[in-house]
Image: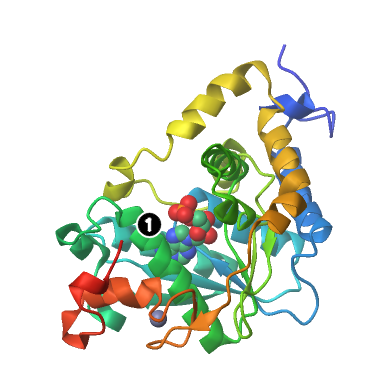
Amino acid sequence: MPFKCERCRSAVAEVFIPYARLRLCPDCFSRFYIARVKRTVEEYKMFGEGDVIGVALSGGKDSAALLHALKQAYPNLDFKSLHVNLGIPEYSSHCQAKVEKLTADLGVDLHIFDLRKELGISLDEFKKTQFKHKICSVCGTIKRHVFEELAQKLHINVLATGHNLNDMAAVMFKNFIYGHWEQLVRLKPVLHPQAEGMTRKVKPLIKSPENENLLYCLYNEIPFREIDCIFSLEVNARKDIKLLEVLAKDNPHLWHQMLNRFLEIMPMLESKVQKKPIKRCQNCGFPSAHEICAYCKRISIVRPMRNLVSEDTVKP
Ligand code: AMP
Ligand code: ZN
């Protein structure tokens, strides 16, 4: 006999939530998922009336689930979505098509920043530079900068991303092991603007496990990418997740426990991290710890005509 859903007690349960010992039918699962996103937004006061909210869409399942759930939780709020097309052959056009379909289905404005069109470069050009083994980190630097540029243009003051529970717990764990306190404190659910005119960064899926984001997309027929980025195969970023997955087999609460413990010690860590004085990049004017920001340094390498920085001044 199939199990009945423990919420509605009528439909057949298809999902088992191990940390809550809950069996749910697809509809009750979606309600459970949306309610958690809403609770997370409210618990950390991620946004409210008067905020202009941008949702960063990669084409992947996490950010796709995020936009869909936010629209269900806050039907009267106006979300703008942002997508960066990185010019990675095959992959980027595939991702853009998914994001276009999703936003059309949901009736959400989509703003695309295409690296090729806007800057005449693509991410894979970094394969020929000293960053060839750090493409994912270059990608992160570019995206963070572009998000802010788009946000300024669109008057967005809150930027929501689809970082999920498992990724966040694993990255926090790694930063903890290496004592990278500065990076660790930047993983908070809400990151207030670094300088005037910058966005507040929020992570409404910080409590949502990756597999639930996937299930939510499947049950709600949400389009998301079906191919992996060629560069993600080169890095071993998922190694820490694998290790934690082994531990989580015997302890379904592990991911939430890790997140909660890190959030508990966050204020202590913040006081440990010395705040560096924020300068402005001499080229783009964005906040930077150096005269020229990491973004401008990297772009100038594959776009030498701008000749901002000579190769020998660039330290990866
Ligand atoms: P990642 O660092 O690739 O795990 O992505 C984390 C989050 O950043 C995603 O959930 C999205 O919200 C956002 N993001 C990543 N890549 C892009 C992209 N190309 N365009 C817009 N947002 C992105
Ligand atoms: Zn700059």
As rendered, which of 114 and 297 lies closer to the eye? 297
Residue drawn at (42%, 61%) of the image: 140
Query: Is 251 on the left-hand or right-hand side of 154?
Result: right
Q: Position of residue 197 (x, y in %)?
A: 61, 85
Q: Is residue 104 above or below residue 151?
A: above
Residue position marked by numbered label 1 in the rendering:
137
Residue 148 or 61: which is nearer the viewer? 148
Residue sitting at 66 percent across and 44 percent down?
208
The structure residue drawn at horizontal position 81% and vertical position 53%, both measured from the top left corner, is: 39
Which quarter is ligand 2 in? Answer: bottom left
Residue 220 image offset from top left, x and y in percent: 60, 48
Three-letter amino acid code at disc 1?
Ser
Q: Quadrant of the C terminus?
A: bottom left
Q: Position of residue 155 (x, y in %)?
A: 60, 86
Quarter of the image where one finds residue 273: bottom right
Regarding residue 83, the answer to whether it shows in the image is yes
